[in-house]
Image (cartoon, rainbow, N blue to C red):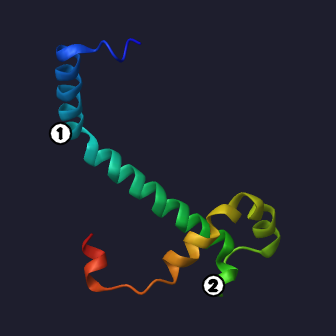
């Protein structure tokens, strides 16, 4: 019920706070998520590289980590086997 009674000044305050967030830290948040994704894909490559023919880690440790990695395998394979272009490095 308090959300319905925000009023004009509440909306202005929220808009100003959103604007400040966008100016100050939105790009840092996006970069942090991008870095996290890259690190996750690198971790999966190191542990499950056998799926692509890159034996880095002994299979015993890969099998121990397999239950934790299973939900991400499909997107990881798609990203690793995707054709890349020169413009992909710029983004």
Q: Quadrant of residue 86?
A: bottom left
Q: Quadrant of residue 77?
A: bottom right
Is residue 55 visible in the rendered image? The answer is: no
The x and y percentages for residue 78 are 53, 77
The x and y percentages for residue 16 are 17, 27
The x and y percentages for residue 65 are 75, 61
Pointer 1: what residue?
23
88 in relation to 11, above or below: below
Pointer 2: what residue?
52
Quarter the C terminus occupies: bottom left
Which residue does the image show at 78% across and 66% down from the upper left?
Answer: 61
The secondary structure type at the circle numbered 2 is helix
19 in relation to 47, above or below: above
Q: Earlier in the sequence, mark 1 or mark 2?
A: 1
Which residue does the image show at 75% across and 65% down from the upper left?
Answer: 66
Q: How many marks?
A: 2
């Amino acid at each position: 019920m308090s959300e319905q009674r925000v009023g004009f000044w509440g909306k202005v305050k929220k808009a100003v706070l959103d604007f400040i967030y966008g100016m100050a830290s939105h790009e840092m948040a996006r970069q942090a998520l991008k870095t996290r994704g890259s690190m996750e894909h690198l971790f999966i490559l190191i542990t499950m590289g056998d799926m692509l023919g890159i034996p880095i880690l002994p299979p015993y440790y890969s099998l121990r980590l397999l239950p934790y990695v299973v939900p991400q395998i499909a997107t990881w394979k798609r990203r690793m086997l995707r054709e890349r272009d020169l413009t992909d490095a710029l983004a």
